[in-house]
Amino acid sequence: MEKNEKRCNNKLKTLETKLMALKRDGASSMVALQCAQSSIGYINSDVINLISKIFGESPESIYSVASFYPLFKLQQEGRHIINVCTGTACFVLGAENILKEMERLLGISEGETTPDGNFSLTTVHCVGCCANAPVVTIDGKVYAKVKVKEVKNILDEWRGK
Amino acid sequence: MIDLLKIKKQYAPKVDARRQNGGSRQVLVCGGSSCMADDSRTLYNTLVKIQKESGSFEVVCVGCMGLCSRGPAMIVYPEGVFYEKVTKADIDRIIKEHLVGGKVVMDKVYNRDDAGNIVPLEKMPFYSKQLKLVLKNCGRIDPINIYEYISQDGYFALEKCLKSLSPDEIIDILSKSGLRGRGGAGFPTGKKWMFTKSAVGDTKYVCCNADEGDPGAFMDRAVLEGNPYAVIEAMTIAGYAIGAKQGYIYVRAEYPLAVETLRKAIDSAHKVGLLGKNILGAGLDFDIELRLGGGVFVCGEETALLESVEGRRGEPRPRPPYPANEGLFGKPTLLNNVETYANIPNIILKGADWYSAIGTETSKGTKIFSVGGKIKNTGLVEVPMGISIKEIVQDICGGVPDGKFKAVQTGGPSGGCIPARYADMPVDYDSLTKIGAMMGSGGMIVLDDKTCMVDMAKYFIGFSVSESCGKCTPCRVGNKRLYEMLDKITKGQGEEGDVEKLKFLCTEVKQNSLCGLGQCSPNPILSTIQHFEDEYVAHIRDKKCPAGVCKCLTQYEIDKSKCVGCSLCARNCPVGAISGEIKKPFEIDQAKCIKCGECFKNCKFKAVTTGGERR
């Protein structure tokens, strides 16, 4: 536990240096949040307080920006992020059924993380490769023309990892 | 200072050889997002490795070639053969037989006739009816290599502006060309530039809207990934014309490849002095910064975008004041879409008359569409304005694979449907508006008889509900109520009079919402009611979903007289609800069925029906 805390503190220290540099370049607090999201993985209260201190804005205003944009995650996510594309092309080719099957097999709803912390299930409006519809991506790996029947195998591929 | 002409002379022969057959051996690998998703990166890396060992050919990773459904794609010159769906095994064969052995691998070639002869790519149906002006470099040059861009007359438009045109003359050319905003609304570009130029203020900004949020639209992404300098050059011209020193490109963070390409392109432009101080020695200072979006659809609306660039919540501002007068940081700001900018270098170089000769009376030039859905050739097409829907769907994109062509959806969540009976209508801003659809940014989704229009409308309203920023009540609450009404109808709980109620609320939301999102979000409902009211009636009165999509109104059954017992349905059923003996009719266990429709989709004999009695 102590070890974990230390690692977190180290991460925050590195982030602080990066944020100070951004502040010097005249960046906005949204750019700071993007930086924090990519280096820490999610925005917690420590991060919000840090940005608030460096950028001289209230924690509330930083939070209002962080909570507006879905790309800022306010909670730690699962080890593997599943994105089911629900863009129009995927939708007309049955993305809804793929999502339902994912939910059925994982036992969670869209937007949730499995209790073992293995998978987070999210939807995305169009990843822009409509020729491959319906599309699912897991940690960036793209599964093209997914069939309901294939969902189980796709998940199994990631279960052990 | 950079000598454009010298660079052009040096690089043009190599790049030009990629158009006509001839010249040295070059291999172009498509590096667009769609082909990348199919692992074209591995193909590229394999080719680069072989190239380094043998050195007998050149490999270039290019932008989107347009024919996404045939990806991963590559073209080999001097023969000009287009290899489709290239797998890891195929690439070894192509290297061995073609690149080393000199013999074309015929069975992987897309552009060949029935007799096995290679047909020039531009004569293939997919390409022959297209007119590639904005996309002319896309899929042909190395997008990051600024010299290859210059070799295709890149930056000559900027040079022309700085050396021989005054800001007013530039704006005059744009006005006369008839170019209208490609983001969807179709506002005359020249007018926008003139408003921003004449706005009072020392500091002005040039902004590019690359927040392509419509689901199913990927035109801007392809331009940014395949021809980024066209946008950068046009923004620099805009900086000169309106008197701005700073530009911003607001791009979706969900497009990592476009972001990376833009970053590299901006860096290169800096290095050769085409961005920064004293550009081309003409005293122009101009710079561009990238701003990444945060996954919010409404940020594609111009005032919300400006809020987001400033680093705040992307909530729209009331207009007026318009961005031309009070935009970014309260200063006059020119905001155009990616495709609009990418048109401009061509117009400056070739003139307003050349441009206005293409297209129709009120819609000039070309438009890029990303065509997807129930269509054979999914991909990116650039066509002259005024072409018919039929030509795009049938001739270019090869038609609907199985099933009957029902409609085309344009404009995404803000747009509407064009039913099949209007297939001969010309595609331009005004004709589409007349029948209740819209040009939109260019997403075109083809629908067939297995698409339920009520469900489709519900999908788009659901999208608008989740993307409404919540600032104004008509949009926040109105869309939610619309969604609930549609949800009720698709569940078989619709009542007589629901259609009228829908129409009434749609009009209220349209008229009273603050920004474009709410003002347009009811369009998909109004348009489907206008053209497909019979489907609404079938759901409400007969409690039936003619397309077999709405689960509560559908029960899948196997028609014993048509079933040949091939077991394909059973093999595709994810829950094992279908059983039977081979060569005898199969049966669906309704207690197990989750109504995913895989059996219905896969049956080759139309033996699976949706017409069963409702449970």
Image (spheres, coloured by chain):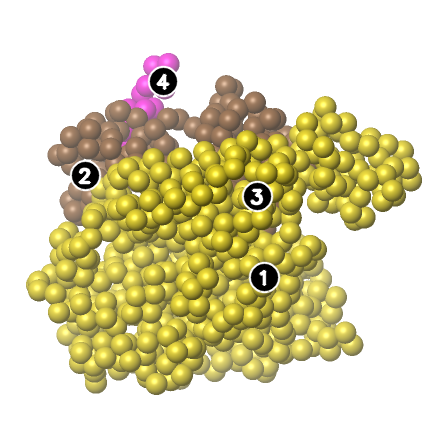
| Chain label for disc 3 | B
- Range covered by the magenta-colored residues: A1-15
For the point 42% across and 77% down, which residue is it? B360
Chain A shade: brown
Q: Is residue B27 left or right of residue A75?
A: right
Which is more toward the observer, B20 or B558? B558
**Amino acid at the residue labelled 1:** Ala
Distance of label 1 from label 4 (alpha carbons): 65 Å
Q: In this view of the protein, which residue sits in the foreground, A150 or B449? A: B449
Q: Quadrant of residue A11?
A: top left
Q: Nearer the viewer, mark 1 or mark 4?
A: 1
Circle 1 residues within 10 Å: few <14, some 14–19, many ≥20 = some
Tell me if residue B451 can be seen: yes
Tags 1 and 4 on a common chain: no
Which residue bears the numbered disc 2?
A: A20
Outermost residue, top direction? A1
